[in-house]
Amino acid sequence: MFVHTQISKKLETPISWSLSAAGRSLFLMLAMLAVLLMPKVGQAQSYTSQVTGLVKDTAGAIVPNAMLVATDTARGTSLSAKSDEQGVYRFPSLQPSTYRISCTMPGFRAFQQEGVTLLVDQVLQLDITLEVGEVKEIVTVTSTQAGVETANASLGQVVTQREIEELPLNLRDSLGLIALTPGTVLGANFSDGGGGNVGRNYFRSDFNVGGGRSGSQAIMLDGAPNTTGDVSRAVISPPVDAVQEFKVQATSYDAQFGRTSGGIVNVLTKSGTNDIHGSVYDFERDSSMDASNYFATGNVPNYHRRQTGGVVGFPILRDRWFMFGDFEALRQQLPVSTLSSVPTQAQRAGDFSSTYYQASATSAPAQVVIYDPATYNATTGRRAAFKGNIVPANRINPVALNILKSYPLPNQAGNAVTNVNNYIYTDNSVTNTNKYDLRTDLHPGEKTTIFGRFSRQTDARIVPGAMPPAIAGTVTDDHYAQIVIGLSRVITQNLFANIQTSFTRGLANQAGGLPTVDLGSLGFSSTFASIAAPQLPIISMTDYRALTQKSSVGQQHQPRNNYVTTGLLTYTRGRHSWKFGAEYWILNFNEYQNANSSGTLKFDHTFTQQNPTAATSKTQGNDLASFLLGIPSGVSSTTGAAGSYIRKVAGISTGGLYSALFVQDDFRATSRLTLNFGLRWDLSRGNREKYNRVAWFDPTAPSPLAGPAHLPNLTGVAVWAGSGASKDQQETKWSNFNPRFGFAYQLPHQAVLRGGYGIFFLPKSVQASGAGAIGTTVDTLMPIDSVIPANSLTDPFPQGATLPSNNRDPNTGAGSTISIPLYHYTSGYVQMFSLDFQKQLPFGFVLDTHYWGNLGTHIATSKNLNQLPNQYLSLGSKLTTTTVPNPFYGVLANQSAPGQKTITLRQSLLPYPQYVGDGGVVQVYEPAGKTNYNAGTVQVTKRFSKALSLNAAYTYAKSMDNLGVPLDSYNRAGEYALSDQDATHQAIVSFLGQLPFGRGRRFAHDMNRLMETALGGWDANTIIRLQSGFPVNIARPAVLAPEANAQLDNPTPQQWFDTSVISSAGSYSFGNMGRQIPHVRSDMLQNVDFVLVKNIAASWHDHTITTQLRAESYNFLNHPQMSAPNGTPTSANFGTVTTQANRPRAFQFAVKVKF
């Protein structure tokens, strides 16, 4: 089965990206390039390196007018420089490589330093001392690379080519090694993509660095932005053997960097050299040696992964023109297991006589009593229980019976009392990925360098759900591409220019993997069959796994296009190095996404508990009982769209513009002190939709409904872009200035003290879905009535569905719910600061200790604008039991809550009663979030040694924020708590070691070939990661018993914390709990990855060919990390862990030939 075929059949494609549009965009990009080719601007986000220093004689006097040459020993290219009147020289832009630096001056011996290794975005300070003598005499120094950074204050780490190629790296994605950087916390989707260990590129780079926010980092590939406009995560992921190195900066005080909340990642691809070099490889994984998932039963399902590919670099014209290309294919079937709860055979037949609830293992079980909704007594406000706790067969809805035929029975023994966790499902996630890159580097002369790269990747996947494919699963077919062109030019001895332009495209296609069904044959009404997609709707339940899951991911067709031109002009004079730069981004996001094309039908306790208006009881009512009776719950007036609804969506096309100007001065004030001063100006235009189909919310504008509804003070309208107002969805801020300052002071004995401060404005998302695209996304809601069922499962939406329209009505969304921004907007920014001490230790070790912080202000989050004012909570149940005349009856056409003759008292008291429920108006991109990250790190590294490379770091950190939709919108401060990804302790160790036996090694270096084959050429490499668990969130409102502590000394998956001290707070209280359960954290990470490598070298025509045999193991000690426990007090699984967060031990074997 081909995934692409499934996508083409299942996906509607409301938006097309025509060739003409692509051509116009490409023309615009090339035109911008042509303008910028004039030598006045350059590449703003540089991956190139710099070498600077002082030329002195042996007496310490400066030597002006000395001639210097930097020669790339692999490519034969060179660049000249001259020391100025203050003895300062600079090579402002060198491609990361290994160089020979030479210096000549009449009257002095020639100086030559070999083996100067420059890493990505490195500033190397190399002072040169000339000895008196003849020029023909050469003083040659073999470089012993300094480990301390003396030229700037940025905190970062370079992951070298050797580390990338030799460390154990699952999936062979170089960004998988970003965890080697201290202060990096990996998100839930990191290298996973929301399903299957081979994740979609958009989700796989889910990480944060130094307190930044995931999805708002600066990620670059060869200096070009490698992200899309809606989320700042990596688009292109080159093969490991095509990556030279990458650098992660937790803090940077260089004004050339922007659009980040913390974390600047710059990946550098390989280029060709004067020698033909490359590799071919085959990496194989198989389940035969892998361990089982902690929760899986039976044997590990058979699966296989194969990654094959090759890279090659070669000269077209020696010393001038080089090419490099790569190709890699991945084919995988990966087992995915999910533990859940499904109804027993008796429950499916309506028999709940053996259905019990148990608060904890030591508490007494209580029967769950099912009440008959037909027996409601209006006088007492109560219902009578079903006789024998059994729903009669003649009361069971025939549609429910038909849907249940697809629902699996338990396949394992669940809890002996409650029967929860009685179903485990394991299936294979199938992935087919292809990627290739082609890069060229041209040096037409010493002063000019031209660079270009084309990258393309395809990713097709089938991901299983928690049940058989007939009722769960997802199919994706994604395409990624990038084109980058760059030019470097030496204009004069002290003036240098870089320019770069790039086009990046990410196309996400996704559909539910469910088969087409005839809804009419299941018993649904003709009305529902005509408005719903021909697939099973979501049957949403809390007590059991949702009966269908395909629409939880829904359908997607989302092309994302970025056009970026950047430039940099470097001017050096004396001890100053000035940089002037500019950036211009065009961001496009054509978006179609519908998570509910077949509708969501929610079933809960409302109609089968004794008191319909009381809070949900764990011992009264049952989701399945309500489903069997065919009584879905409508949209609650307190929770908005949490009930049953169906969604209709039209595609939208959103665009944004971003530009920046910056200036930077790196000033070597003395021979020991370097100062960095910078200022950046960011300008992000408010988002625009191509056809003005987006709006913002004006909370104070008089509503046109005020007159017809006889509510003179009614406010709140949707203001449509372009309708007498701005075409932008949010205002443009013109005052986003980013000051930067850093210093580096060289102390005696090869030590340096560094520090800095900088402001960074965050990237502004161009995503409009769920953000005021109310004319293109329309939800038809089922009305709410907790006493008398509003609609039935058979005919859930008898009024039909409202279709999207572009009528630009200011009342659009009234009678429903909306998620929408306000026009006035404050840009989010972070303040980064650090103080760092580095010391060169004996034997090539470097000690680095630093304190660093990140404070976020005006971070975009969300807020409920339609929350019931707190002063009315004292009315209690009267809010929902008391009805009042509906002022909107006959005014609003739909039949949801504001379209009925009466509404609840609660609905009438809302700030905007024309919208449904407390969640009726959600303000997105509310600039009210704040973050606070502080950390201390101790790190020891040893690099540039063939026999040993070590990186060991420990970080103690605390991260806090107030992000997310607050429980009480009138009290945002009450949300301030530990961040969801707060990791108090974090330790990382990576080790590359050659076993000291064999030819070219310390011992037995003269052993014969037979012994060498067996005992020589072995390497052992490992990564060890230890990390605290994250805080455990609680579903609120909730109550913690006075002076209680839910933490357990020995938590188990069956009971991770003491659930008996936590309960739901009910409907009219906020409870006393914050976002998290105090003192309770999820399981800690303890992971060891290990690889054993055998190198077999052979010679052929003066070239060395090395064959590597690799045996790799991930989670070598097979230590399971439990996922976070269930934090919903009303759930039957409250306090339990049902999944494993990490992967069981796995082995991978490979053959690689390097030449």
Image: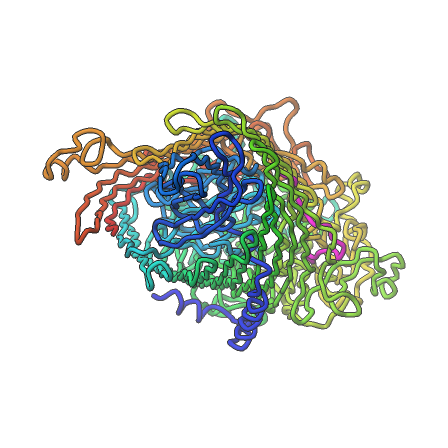
Which residue is drawn at the image coordinates 59% and 38% (left, top)?
Answer: 668
| Residue 826 drawn in magenta | yes
Which residue is drawn at the image coordinates 58% and 40% (left, top)?
Answer: 86
Q: Is residue 124 above or below residue 18?
A: above
Based on the displayed image, in which of its 4 quarters is residue 1127 positioned? top right
Which residue is the extreme one toward the bottom?
20
Asked whether 1061 or 771 is in front, the reply is 771
Based on the displayed image, in which of its 4 quarters is residue 479 positioned? bottom left
Based on the displayed image, in which of its 4 quarters is residue 588 positioned? bottom right
Q: Which x, y percent locates residue 55?
A: 50, 38
Is 985 left or right of 270, judged from the image as shown?
Answer: right
Q: Which residues are magenta?
A: 818-832
Q: Which x, y percent locates residue 484?
A: 48, 62
Asked whether residue 74 is in view, the answer is yes
Asked whether 247 or 20 is in front, the reply is 247
Q: Is residue 973 above or below residue 218?
A: above
Q: Which x, y percent locates residue 407?
A: 43, 54
Q: Classify the position of the N terminus by image quarter.
A: bottom left
| Residue 236 drawn in magenta | no
Asked whether residue 1076 is in view, the answer is no
Q: Which x, y percent locates residue 12?
A: 51, 70
Asked whether 400 or 949 is in front, the reply is 949
Q: Is residue 531 above or below residue 865?
A: below
Colour theme: rainbow
User: How many numbered badges does the structure rendering display?
Assistant: 0
Q: Is residue 767 above or below residue 23?
A: above
Which residue is drawn at the image coordinates 45% and 46% (left, top)?
Answer: 68
